[in-house]
Amino acid sequence: MKISIDIHVNGEQYPAEVEPRTTLLEFLRGTLHLTGTKEGCGLGDCGTCIVLLDGKPVNSCLVLAVDANGRRVTTIEGLAEDGKLHPVQQSFIDNGAVQCGFCTPAMILTTKALLDKNPDPAEGEIKQALGGILCRCGSYQKILNSVQAVGKGERK
Amino acid sequence: MIRLKAFSYFEPASLKEASEILTQHKGEAYPLAGGTDLLVRMKREAIRPAALVNLKRIRELNGIQSEKDGGMRIGALTTIADIENSTVVHTSHPVLAQAAGVLGAQPLRNLATIGGNIGRASPASDMAPSLMVLQARVATEGASGPGEREIDKVFAGPGSTTLSDGEIMTAFYFPAMAPATGAAYLKMGRRSGGGDCALVGVAALLTLGSGEARAVRIAMSSVGPTPRRANKAEAVILSGTITEERMRDAARVAAEEAAPITDMRCSASYRKEIIKVLTFRALQEANQKAQGGQAT
């Protein structure tokens, strides 16, 4: 059984036929080849597969592609504009927040969603927002610094 | 990569249709709400549904509304994040927002729903204790028409409810909180600030009148096969004026009447200690809030 869906990803419509068991994560990586979104545990524990669904961070391993039909998805590939990195991406580079990079797309997307809602979050709010993502390199302090740097007005 | 096994998929637009599909499949079809628990259990092959019935396109299952009498209605498909951030909830039944705010991590709360959390009947539910102290009523729709039951009558055992095949929870109704009432939900996990599974969760609600408790309700999760009330501890609170000593006594009794297990998260004896600490703190917090004069 295949079902027709039409998902809006990074500003473009992607009509497709998917099996109901296809997760949004599998659809993004396997069908659209947007491999910036990572699969870690696949069970909602590690947070590395987070994308923005209608602007809110969600674990894409726990969303069926059919369920994202007609909705708006933003992945890490959709943040840079006209070859210019998003301020959060730039801040992660400037502050050395990227080690192996596996959790970075999820960290950056979640940060973007937080700052869109609250441009200057308190430290506790940042920790709450990013609490669902594991960084196996343990770069948490530098990630926190990067988010705070954007929050302090370096963001345009 | 963990792939889901194949299943047939339905996306009904009405409750009637959803209920019919679920009834026809006689327990082989599962309703899909947020998916944060269902899809995990399917990936782990703890369950293998022949069909999923996605309830998200049924409009009447969404939303939070105040009711005229100070009560509140929350649609079963309302996300935990929407409850956490709702002004209505913060104004009329804030303990529910407190509980929602410590359930899993934020991205999960954007998906998870209150109906899913209760329907899953996890002994460790973070929402159940607050619903129990608020005396929520659960509205259902099924083959035999609409139904309603108290939240205390929903849980049958770990992972099982008293709902029949094809019976769908549609909304939760919360009666108004009485004046001079305070409530709190406290949870102990392995990480501070919530985000993970509760080792123990305790909700307490107190209504005060001239130094005594006019009403008290205490409910606990992760302390037995289902979330449950601590009736004996409640009786201790009702036996006289509210003092710190009486709250400590009640907390000790709550730990005695609970029957927690030892599992990979922690031991039963450790859980008993946590019940004691959390019940005392939840009663203290509820008492302070009740003294603030407002229903908080």
Image (cartoon, coloured by chain):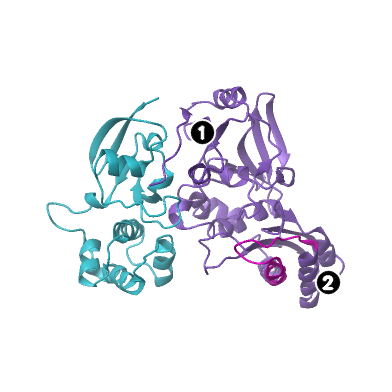
Chain colours: A cyan, B purple
Answer with left or right where residue B241 lies relative to residue B118: right
User: Mark 2 packing: few (<14 Cα in 10 Å), some, or many (20+)?
Assistant: some
Amino acid on which the number 2 mark rests in the picture: Thr
Q: Where A71 falls versus A139 (above or below)?
A: above
Where is residue B11? Give x, y as percent.
Answer: 47, 28
Q: Quadrant of residue B180?
A: bottom right
Q: Can the viewer see residue B127?
A: yes
Look at the image and say whether residue B278 sits in the magenta stretch: yes
Q: Which residue is mark 1?
A: B55
Q: Which residues are magenta?
A: B257-280
Between A1 and B127, the residue placed more toward the observer is A1
Residue at disc 2, secondary structure: loop
Residue occupying the point 71% across, 49% down: B135
Between B296 and B158, the residue placed more toward the observer is B158
Answer with left or right where residue B176 lies relative to residue B265: right
Name, please, the residue furthest toward the left. A83
Residue occupying the point 62% across, 46% down: B118
Q: Where A66 falls versus A62 (above or below)?
A: above
Query: Which is in the foreground here, disc 2 or disc 1?
Result: 1
Look at the image and say whether residue B209 sits in the magenta stretch: no
Where is residue A138? Give x, y as percent.
Answer: 36, 71
Q: Can the viewer see residue A156?
A: no
